[in-house]
Image (cartoon, coloured by chain):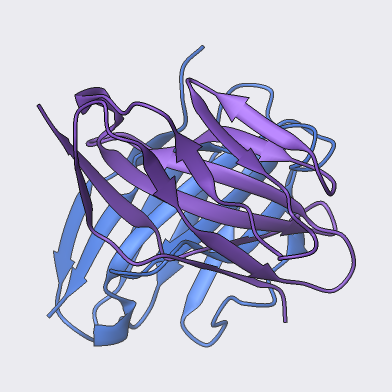
Chain colours: A blue, B purple
Amino acid sequence: EAGVAQSPRYKIIEKRQSVAFWCNPISGHATLYWYQQILGQGPKLLIQFQNNGVVDDSQLPKDRFSAERLKGVDSTLKIQPAKLEDSAVYLCASSLDGGILYSPLHFGNGTRLTVT
Amino acid sequence: GNSVTQMEGPVTLSEEAFLTINCTYTATGYPSLFWYVQYPGEGLQLLLKATKADDKGSNKGFEATYRKETTSFHLEKGSVQVSDSAVYFCALLYNNNDMRFGAGTRLTVKP
């Protein structure tokens, strides 16, 4: 099966600019996650979708971050305006319905964002 | 809060050496525990998991035992290969969707 696709692989922007990341999950996976991985740290959940509804966005900095999953398939994560501390790898993951315990996370290769 | 702490890297071993990567956790209730691996140029992938105390997860020669008394889930392999070079992440799952990852440990195996 095709894996989780993310684009772009790399992005360099200046602070206060905006940026968007795209994710296409594995076909049939109802649940989609966005994680932020700062250098030297483990991934941290930003937002979780179940189909096209938000399940958990408690750790999403909503003043600058937004995400959507139209039609319950592809998803876009946006940052506007970016800050230096947003430099990180943004990981998309998907899983079948039923929770992570029974349907493991499948991760994409991530988008590495550098804010200068 | 729920969290995991894993040993800092990097870890460098010779081929066929014994590997241990330590992981301890803090959690309320009864979490499930995981090890994920990230090979160079690839996304994170599940290596093994354990869902309750005394369970042993195993895969590709790696093992980890869920120790409730020591709140640990150490990753072990008896004989590492060059192809095991990767970053290893310990993770804790709480409430079926709240996954908390450790900072990762980079392993390099030299021939």
Of residues B65 and B38, the one nearer the viewer is B65
Q: Residue at x 23, y 36 (%)?
A: B41
Vertical relation: B88 (above or below) B81: below
On the picture, is A25 further left or further right than B99? left
Among all residues in the image, which is located at the extreme top?
A1
Q: Residue at x 26, y 73 (%)?
A: A87
Indicate left or right for B64 with A88 as reference: right
Residue B8 in the image, given as x and y percentages of width and height = 34, 67
Residue B106 in sight here: yes
Q: Position of residue B101 (x, y in %)?
A: 54, 61
Is A29 rendered above or below residue A14?
Answer: above
Up-down relation of residue B16 to residue B110 (above or below):
above
> Residue B68 versus residue A59: which sits nearer the camera?
B68
In the displayed orientation, state which residue is furthest to the right: B29
Q: Is residue B67 left or right of residue A61?
A: right
Number of numbered callouts drawn: 0
Image quadrant in which the N terminus of chain B is located: bottom right
Splitting the image into 4 quarters, where does residue B109 fall? top left
On the image, the x and y values in percent for residue A27 come to 61, 21
